[in-house]
Amino acid sequence: MPQRKPYRVGRSATGLGLFATETIEEQAEIVEYLGRRIPTRLAQEIDRRRGNKYLFEIDTRWTIDGSTRRNLARYVNHACDPNAEAVLKGDRMVYRALERIPPGAEITIDYGEEYVELYFKRGCRCAGCRE
């Protein structure tokens, strides 16, 4: 029997986002970033063609192309003060809670300063920066 997911995709201030449907405890694994592994060199070519949409660089050699619709982790948005983080566990990339996340809260990670500078045309629009 499939395990119930503690999240749902919903409307966010910045588009679609991933939201907790039940309390997610600190350090709990939330969702795996799914997609095919491609050489980072190929990912850089894809980035030049379509932008860095759903490309998650693991290291200088490998990147996950998370553009598949099965990859619900792609809906996790950026926040300068995130409540989750990306963690490499063996050959899997998972998002893990940095703190207790209550039901209804948006699940966020910090994409990093370089990513924000390169891809956010109007600057950061996370909740902390909009205030």
Image (cartoon, rainbow, N blue to C red):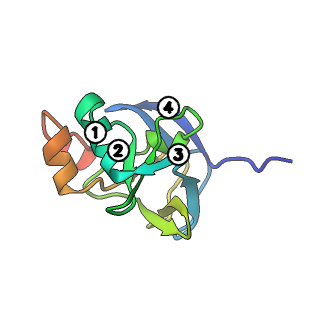
For label 3, count other residues whose C-alpha is less than 10 Å away and answer few (under 14), some (14-19) or many (20+).
few
Left or right: residue 10 versus residue 118 is right
Which circle's residue, 3 or 2, is located before the other in the chain? 3
Q: Nearer the viewer, mark 1 or mark 4?
A: 1
Q: Quadrant of residue 80?
A: bottom left
Q: Nearer the viewer, mark 3 or mark 1?
A: 1
Q: Which residue is labeled 1 in the image?
A: 45
Mark 4 in CB contact with mark 3 (< 8 angstroms)? no
Q: CA distance from mark 3 to mark 1?
A: 16 Å
Which circle's residue, 2 or 4, is located before the other in the chain? 4
Q: Nearer the viewer, mark 4 or mark 3?
A: 3
For label 4, count other residues whose C-alpha is less than 10 Å away and answer few (under 14), some (14-19) or many (20+).
some
Circle number at residue 36 = 3
Residue toward you, 90 or 109: 90
Name the kind of residue labelled 1 in the image: Glu
Q: Which residue is labeled 4 in the image?
A: 10
Can you see residue 93?
A: yes
- Residue situated furthest right in the rendering: 1
Residue 118 location, x and y as percent?
15, 43
Left or right: residue 73 versus residue 118 is right
Q: Which residue is labeled 2 in the image?
A: 42
Mark 2 in CB contact with mark 1 (< 8 angstroms)? yes
Name the kind of residue labelled 2 in the image: Leu
Q: CA distance from mark 2 to mark 1?
A: 5 Å
